Every structure is written in structure tokens, then in C-alpha cells.
Image: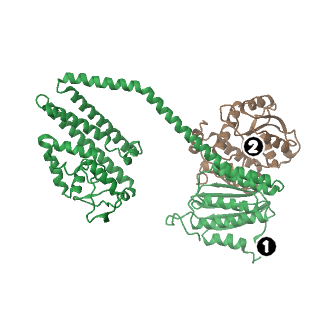
Amino acid sequence: MTTPERTVPRSRVRVVLVDDHRMFRSGVRAEIGELVDIVGEAPDVDSAVTVIRETRPAVVLLDVHLPGGNGNGGVDVLHGARGLETEDGQPVRFLALSVSDAAEDVIAVIRAGARGYVTKTINATDLVHAIRRVSDGDAVFSPRLAGFVLDAFGAAAGEIAEVDEELDRLSAREREVMRLIARGYQYKEVAKELFISVKTVETHVSSVLRKLQLSSRHELTAWAMGRRLL
Amino acid sequence: MPTPYERPAPAPEGRAAATTATTTTAAASARPRRVYARPAEGRVIAGVSAGLAEHLGWPVRWVRIGFVLSCIPTGAGLVAYVFLWALSPQSRGGVIGGGITTIDPADPQAAARVPDPAKAKAASEERDATRVLLVGGVMVFVGLVVAAQSAGFNARLRILVPLLVVAVGAVIAWSQLDDAQRGRWLGNDSGTKRFSAARLVFGGILALAGLVIMATRGRSISAMWDIGAAVVAVLAGIALIAAPWMLRLWSDLRREQAELARATERADIAAHLHDSVLQTLALIQRKAQDPAAVVQLARAQERELRSWLYAAPTDPDVTLAAAVAEAAHEVEELHGIPVDVVSTGDRPLEDGGQALVRAVREALANACRHGEPPVSLYLEVGPAGVEAFVRDHGPGFDLDEVPEDRLGVRNSILGRMERHGGRARVRRLENGTEVSFALPPVTADAPEESHDHA
């Protein structure tokens, strides 16, 4: 995100805002409306799917808890808008936004396909960064999400994947990256600490996201099954 | 029924005595007044003999032999036994030892209040239940034999024996249903529940058989079958008619219970919101001119509500992660700067953990005082030990530049960790400062928990 071609002004990211609280929507619009192009808003699952299908934005800011649909909130929106593409041929990407940082909320939206997860207390600058990163196809991991990943994959207990492709455990490098993110490091700080490029950090994070979405690891599936998400 | 053993113990009087004995003390008379009750332990069948022996002061063996002998000619002893069984209360916690009881008349309830070890209790209950079933089976056999023998010529037994069978069935089914047993009956642990159900069914069948025998009055077996079938048909009919009504009653009851539970839950939530969120909102309105105070109030309330909604109740005195989070919250409240806490894993709080918590608190306070937000804290508890990191985004400082007399960092962070076998390190980053802590894993011989707050 610090590479020059990305900070150079480019076409503003098209964003749809999905949240059932009007005050929150107008607050976000006031804070980041100058920096991104908010092309639509929706207060519930059904109108969200409609708006997303019509506008086909680059990023959907998606509240986890929403009325309507099958009662699964943001997860229903993700299912309803699956496979959509923007005019550039990029997939429509989702950044989950929630007041809750309960593990089951995180796991539900990530497994349904969200590229990142931030809490609503995030400040405007960080939110815009997160939106840009998601629109570039990267994953956005908050420190808390990183901590949860370390927990769920048993990485804190010392379980390390033998090969990188293994879905149920993190590789040693991925674990290092997650640990640094959990410690509050930005991607560029992680890169500096591990003597790797920011791009490599992003690759590792995306790979962790993929494992999080595809792994059948017991803890993840137990959570998902317990909440009828699978 | 001329048996010498039924005379001295009229059951209603025994029951009355039982109620008064709980209020009078042993000091009222020289010899404490013995209450006729069936002891729970040291019994063979139902404790009638043991209770009687205890009541009369006779050796329990002689009482038992007497009962058996009196049964042989006419079965009178059996009738007496069943009567005593049905009408006498079960004593609570009385222990029989060779005819002498150790029950304390001053406070017979005390023994019942002492909790038994659950395993021994369950085992003895199972033994009891098996014995009751066994004895019941023998009684059925005897009853049927007597009934067959007397079918033609003994009119008295023809009524007496079925009555006896009915009585035994009823006793088996219901006599044990005192208040202590009722809880178990309604199903606390599956083992006793199964035995209770078996006993109930068995008693019911016994009583039914007695009724059928009484109704047939020694007519032929086929007539008995007819009557048996008729009884079953009538019972089935009653069940058929009553079933929908019973079902509705049951579902109504269930719904009412569910509604009650929901209402209670709603009341709990309302009470909690009133005590926390509404109070905070009122405070925020009053402090609207002070943004810092408003942010702090909102943040504290958010944290409180969040932990109430999502977190499992953890005690900060018990686990390391909870204690560290508690310390972070205290610092946050004190300085009004948000601290992001992320932790994975947990372990019981021991001496080293206590030291870590204090050192982390000091580092967080430093980060809030000298650094810039965001301040973050990461705690990782694993088999290789504990690691913690406190990070801020301030200009940072060099440990060598800190004057010797400023003991904060050197003493309360670095020194404290080293004293407890761990280590701490201060790192100056490009953008901020990071203090890292490490503790070795808890060794096997170390105490699991510590109560002293050093």
C-alpha cells in the first residue's frame, strides 16, 4: 500500500454501504465520502442484494448483523451476491464491519467470503486503507482477527504446517506474520521486521484467509456447525 | 393377626413421635425417646425389622427370625411387615449397628444435610433398588403359589392373598416416594431413574395382578385371562380418552415454563441495561461539553457491555489472560487511552504470572503516559511459555537515556521479570516503542495455583 503507483490518485473506489443503522451509515458517509465513491446504501439483506447487483461496486462495507434474508445477516448478503463482478471484471469484494468481535461472527462472514473484518470503532483513515486494500484483492486482518486465527489453528500452541499448502495449520512464516499483526504492526512494519516485501506479507495474509475459508479444522467447523453456518 | 410384633408399634403413633422428636431434645428424659422409623442403612428389605429392633431395643437378628417364623403358618407376619413398611417413615441418616442406633434424636436432620460422596451414594442406591426388585419377585412367586393352592378350598386366603399382592405392589411403587426420593424419581441421574421406573412398573403390574386375582375369586384360568383382558381394555380406553387431554396439559405446562424462563431472562437483561447503559447515557448527556470524558465513558461502557454479552465469565484472580485483560482495562480507565487487547491461550495464574501482570500494567501505563495511541497488547500463552508485547506509537525512548533514578522501567518491568525467571526487553521501533515479556512454561512440580498476592 506504500508503493507509489497505489498512493497516486486513481479512480476512487466504488463502495456500497450496508448497515441497518441510518446514523452509522450517515456517519461513515460523512467520514469517508470524500475519499471513496459511495454509490449505494442498504439497510437490510434483501435491499442490499438488489443494490449490490445494480451498482456492482468494488467493495461492499457489510454489517454482520442485518435484518431480513434467512436471518443470518451479512452471511446472507454474501451468499446472495456470490459471483458478481465489477465492470473491470474484478469480483465484488466484501469488507465486514461489526460492533461485535465475537469469534462466531468473524468466522461466519470470513467463511462466507468476506476479504476482511474490522470493528466499527475503526477510525476513518484506517477504514479507507482497509477498503483500498480489499479492493486490491488483499485481505484485511485486525489484530483481534489475527489472534483468533492463531488460536483456531493451534499456532499459539506450537502447531506448524509441514508444507505451506496444508489447510489445517499455519506455516511458520504465516504464524510469524499473524503474530506481528496481533502485536499491532502494520503490514509495512511486518515486512520490515521479517525482512520481506509488503507484497509477500500480503501474500501470506491472503493465504491465511484462504485457509480460514477452506479449512475443515475442528475448531472452525465446530463453531460454524454450532451456529448452522455450514 | 395374632403376632406379638405388631402390637408395640402402632404406626400412626410412630409418625407423630417422629415429628415431635425433631423439636424435643435428648435431655428431656434420661433415655432418649426412640422413634420408630426405618433406617436407610443396614436394612435387608425395607428396614422394618431394623427399625423395630431399634425401637424395642431387641437384637435385630431375633426380630428378623420372628418375622420369618410368623410368616410360615398363615402369612400374618408378612401382613404385619407390609403394614409397618407402608405406614412408617424412613429415618434420615440413621445408622444401625447390631441393634443399637447412632441416630441423634436432638437433630436427626443434621445427618441428612451432610452431603454424601456421590459415588458411594449411587452405588448403595443401586444395591437397594436391586434388592427391592429381588424381594418383590420372590413375593410375587410366593403369592402366586399360595393363590394356586388356596384356589379351591380356603376362602379366607383367597381374599387375603390378592389383597396382600395389591398392597405389596402399591408399596413397591409408592412407599419410597418421600421428598428426598421424589427429586431422584423425576430424574436426576439416569441409573436411579431407570431403577425407579422399573420399580414403578413392577409395582403397578403386581397391584394389577392382585386386583385380577381378587376379581376372579378362584375361577378358571381362562376366565382369569378374560378378566385380565377386560382390565387391560378398560385401562387402555381410559388412557385413550385421557391422552389428548394429558398431552395438552403437558404442552401447556411446557409453554408456560418456557414463557416464564423468557420473562425472567428479559427482566435480567432489562435490569442490567438499566444499571449500566442507561446510567452511562445519562452521564454522557450531562458531560456533553467534555468530549474526552464522553469518549472515556462510552469506551468503558462498551467494554462492560461487550464482556457481558460475549465473554464467558472468567475470574481475573484465576487465569493469566483474564488478569492481563483486567490490568489493561484499569490502565485504559486511568489514562483514558484505548488499549487493544489480543490474547491467545490461557493458563492458571501463578507467581510468575502475577509478576507478568504487574510488569505489563507498568508498561501499558508508560505507553499511555509517554507514547501515542494506539496502544496494543498481545498475550500468547503456549506450551513454550508466555509471551507478551506492549506496543505504542510514540516517539520512543532509549533505555540508556533514562536516568538511573527513574526506577519505573528498570525495576518494575525488567527487574521484576528477571526475579521470576522471565525476561523483558524494550525495543525502539521506527514508529513507537515495544516492550516484550517472556515467561518460561510452568514446570510440573510448580503449584497449580497461588493464593498469596506477593
Secondary element at image label 2: loop
Quarter of the image with the C terminus of chain B is bottom right
Residue ID at (42%, 45%):
B188
The numbered mark at residue B168 is none
Above or below, comparing residue B210 to residue A208 in the picture: above
Between residues B55 and B78, which one lies in front from this camera angle?
A: B55
Chain green in the figure, letter: B
Residue kind at label 2, given as amino acid type:
Asp
Residue kind at label 1, given as amino acid type:
Glu
Q: Position of residue A132 (x, y in %)?
A: 80, 43
Chain A: give its colour: brown
Between residues B320 and B216, which one lies in front from this camera angle?
A: B216
Between residues B380 and A47, which one lies in front from this camera angle?
A: A47
User: Quadrant of residue A69 in the image?
Assistant: top right
Q: Position of residue A183 (x, y in %)?
A: 70, 56
Q: Is residue B439 left or right of residue A11?
A: left
Residue ID at (35%, 25%):
B236
What's the chain of the residue with tag 1?
Answer: B
Q: Position of residue B166 (x, y in %)?
A: 25, 35
Secondary element at image label 1: helix
Above or below, comparing residue A20 to residue B383 in the picture: above
Q: Position of residue A134 (x, y in %)?
A: 76, 42
Q: Is residue B406 left or right of residue B71?
A: right
Looking at the image, the residue that sits furthest to the bottom is: B405
Q: Is residue B106 visible?
A: yes
What's the chain of the residue with tag 2?
Answer: A
Tell me the residue that label 2 is attached to. Answer: A138
Label 2 packing within 10 angstroms: few (<14), some (14-19), many (20+): many
Q: Is residue B263 left or right of residue B232?
A: right
For marks 1 and 2, give the one nearer the viewer: 1
Tell me the residue that label 1 is attached to. Answer: B401
